[in-house]
Image (cartoon, coloured by chain):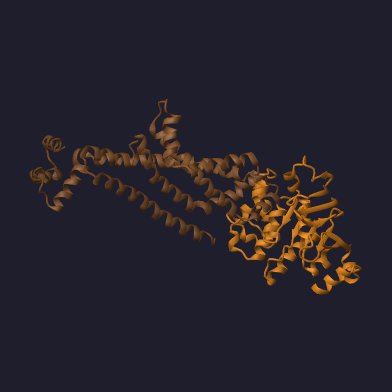
Chain colours: A orange, B brown
Amino acid sequence: MITVKDLHKHFGELKVLNGIDQHISPGEKVVIIGPSGSGKSTFLRCLNLLEVPTGGQIFFEGTEITSPKTNIDAVRCRMGMVFQQFNLFPHLSVMENITLAPITNKLMSKEQARARALELLERVGLPEKADAYPKQLSGGQQQRIAIVRALAMNPDVMLFDEPTSALDPEMVGEVLEVMKALARDGMTMVVVTHEMGFAREVGDRVLFMDAGVVLEEGTPKQIFETPQNARTQDFLRKVL
Amino acid sequence: MLSTLMLGTAQAASANLFDQWWLLIKDKAIAGDLSFWENIYKEIYQNVIFNNRWVNYLKGLGITLEVSFFAALVGLVLGMLLAMMRLSGVKPLEKIAGIYIGVIRGTPMLLQVLIINFGLFGSIAIDRVVIGVIACGINSAAYVSEIIRSGILSVDKGQTEAGRSLGLTQWSTMRLIIFPQALKTALPALCNEFITLIKETSILAYIALTELTKAGDYIRSKTYSAFTPYIVSGILYLVVTGVLTKLLGKLERRLRQGDNR
């Protein structure tokens, strides 16, 4: 579904990504872990071109999205993204937050979008919040709405950029529950996270990143129980 | 001047209360020995009441408000355009907008008005109100664009990213997500700019547009009173800006409360 070839990203002198090759299959749940500054968020953000790579290629469902000829907006309609800071639109109600993009991009009629939004709100347990504004919601609720907003586009893949890092501890669980349910439904997911429990439970494959490369990858069992690389072992010793 | 006054009062046969008061002190006025309060009444009578001169001020105020309103519209639209150009990331557009803003903010408004009036429209028959709207609008746009630009820059980058990640185009993201938030932040400053604009239209007196300042000036040319006509104009400016400032304060409080919703 997503193929990454020799991905590089430099911010001026700073080399954040130094050659990443990855293939993500449909339905796969890939969890990316690693110390901060290792480039994992940058890697994720390159996948939908929020960061434009300095070098290398990214293919999504057969299209090279790093090609300047690709209509990136059309590609992004099929890739949902959830941010650490939620980034809900504060001037719009929850319903408007969710239906804005599907309606503006003419993927659905207004009625369809509203129906879909209500169905999704039901699924994350927030059907009564449709007319609320983001500021009235807790962090956990906001992040669940943000997930719904991304899902409303009916994406083929969901990208999560540390979705629980900005949350109060007691709210982490409700967001992870939604993500687990999504995983059970077969969604393709790429998740950058510090939640090792989630990585172990949900991940099909875990990538350990450091210094802009994938140092080690494998099943959660391999990575968490028998890490081969010394840096992976060191990192896991600190976080587990 | 006094002779015209006397003629005028003589014609107003059905003399109203103000005229009657004037008749009471008229002779003393001609003799030049009015008391302090009588003198004040004389000034008001001559500069405001006589010959319905107050209508001149109100007409002037009307033109001031008309020019200000339309100039503000021109300034807002043009200012938005300039702000977008400066933030477009397209180098030539950024340059053009930058030069425009630099020139307008770096030269006196009076000079701009004179250039537009005598230079651009010197040989074209065109309503002075229109010239005033164009000149003030062009000037205001430079300031408005900076207000809007800072409003746009104050919106968190995550908002743009969220919009773009949902497949919205750059323009849709700007229009539906960034702009409404930027406008809300910029609204108090924009209203302030509008209040400033009302006062600055007085410069149009220079091109003989009978707005509020020129209206006062016109009365002065009739009565030779050095102070009163200008003070009457000034009071009218104060009333308008005062009311608007009060409303602006209300608006700001509303916006602050709205932040919690």
Q: In which quarter of the image is residue B159?
A: bottom right
Q: Position of residue B223 (x, y in %)?
A: 20, 40
Q: Quadrant of the N terminus of chain B?
A: top left
Q: In which quarter of the image is the C terminus of chain B?
A: bottom right
Badge count: 0
Point 80% across, 58% down: residue:
A190
Q: In which quarter of the image is residue A167?
A: bottom right
- The answer, for residue B113, to whether it is visible in the render is yes
Q: Is residue B231 left or right of residue A232?
A: left
**Between B141 and A147, which is closer to the camera in this rendering?**
B141
Q: Where is residue B5 in the image (x, y as percent from the top left)?
A: 15, 38
Q: In which quarter of the image is residue A223?
A: bottom right
Q: Where is residue A176 in the image (x, y as percent from the top left)?
A: 74, 65
- The answer, for residue A240, to whether it is visible in the render is no
Q: In this view, does B260 lie to the left or right of A159?
A: left
Point 60% across, 44% down: residue:
B86
Q: In this view, does B68 lie to the left or right of A145?
A: left
**Between A159 and A39, which is closer to the camera in this rendering?**
A39
Q: Where is residue B56 in the image (x, y as percent from the top left)?
A: 27, 39
Point 86% across, 51% down: residue:
A6
**Between B100 and A205, which is closer to the camera in this rendering?**
B100
Point 54% across, 43% down: residue:
B80
